[in-house]
Image (cartoon, rainbow, N blue to C red):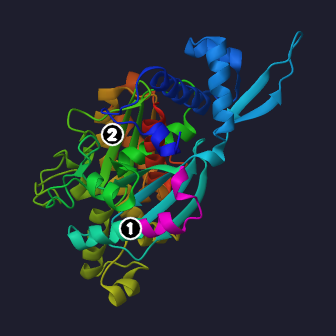
Amino acid sequence: MTSLTEFFVKHEDDALKGVIHKNSIIKRNIIAHMAVNGECTLSELTKELHISVPTITKLVQELVEENIVNDLGKVETPGGRRPNIFGLANSAIYFAGVYVGRDNMRFVITDLQNNIIVEQTDSDFELQDRMQCFERICSSTEQFIATCGIDRDKILGMGLCLVGRVNPDTGRSYKYFTSSEQSLREILEERIGIHVLIENDTRARCYAEYTTGKAKDESNVLYLHLGRGVAVGIVVDGKLYYGKSGFAGEFGHIPFFDNEIICSCGKKGCLETEVSGIAIEDKMCREIEKGVNTILREQYAQRRTIHIDDIIAAAKNDDNLSIELIEEAGEKVGKAVAFLINTFNPETVIVGGNLAMAGDYIMLPLKSATNKYSLNLVYKDTKFRLSKMNENAGAWGVAMLIRNKIIGL
């Protein structure tokens, strides 16, 4: 084996055949098993992977010599010979995750056990549908990979997630940077030189939430992202649900309202036009211009703009207008969530995004409206909780997804 990349990232036209090819697949299965189940003995691997003891012993020893697996010594047993236990050497393999948001970029490096090793934020960024902006994303990503302090040969893949409609299979965004004949994935792979996965930001956050915070009995989960836009991530039977073209979860573009507000998608009456962070920002600006009192009046006079984070902070500082706007959004989105839980009957609904930081100001009206408009049998079986993740959730989640893809989970 000349490199970890050659070991993990195999192509359909790979010339590797016969015993070498078979052993390579078994090694990847060993790594995948340890990544999911943790430390194990040779006999446990033999039983789980249905491979002979001599073969498992030989291949695990090779992985130890390649510094991918550690021999952790003898394990205590009730009697008889004490077997050796083996576990992954997390410092052998890493993955990168990049989140491209509307007003910031976030970068992480994770190890085989999904631990964040390096993290970085670029707050001086604005997402625009121009190729100059995509060039900025490429150059910033290249710089992060080059300066993160991790040997580039050990970074086996990178996931990049961004807002809007994204198809991981084609590697394209269908909202941003659509003018190039090459997919975003192809361009990034050429620029950075490692395997790339392009993903939707809400699905990436959803996967991070589900993976790090799930209860043992949770296999059907909805992640409701209330940021400057609105979307859902869907987990069905423990797996992310994508739909036919990879666009499942565009919840914010369901026509819930009979209004004349034009949504970013070009249609009128979408859920986003009333309950998204952008909608709340617009309402706050209009109310200030009408003369309604708020502690944000002076800030608006100086900047001529208000961010949803400012409104949440004002609500926590007992600003009545901010509280009213957040509670109004919570009630409206709660009615829409009733539709979701009646349809999916999930174990849990996780609420994340900027608006989740509003706490009870958003959750109490949301849950009250959901209870009012959903079927009682469905509502009483559904748990609601706020996101436990920080701002790195998208980058972390997409790093987990590229890890799973490469090691075969």
Task: Identify the residue under disc 2.
Answer: 337
Above or below, comparing residue 336 to residue 122 in the picture: above
Asked whether 268 or 389 is in front, the reply is: 389
Residue type, label 2: Val
Decide whether residue 220 is among the magenta residues. Answer: no
Write the residue at 35% across / 31% down.
341
Q: Nearer the viewer, residue 217 or 255?
A: 217
Give SS at disc 1.
helix
**Residue 389 shows up from this direction:** no
- Res 150 seen here: yes
Q: Is residue 176 above or below residue 7?
A: below
Find the distance from the CA under tag 1 to the CA under tag 2: 21 Å
Instruction: Return the x and y of residue 399 as percentages of the image width and height.
Output: 47, 48
- The total number of labels drawn is 2
The image position of residue 16, as x and y in percent, is: 40, 30
Region rendered in magenta: 142-154
Q: Which mark is residue 308?
A: 1
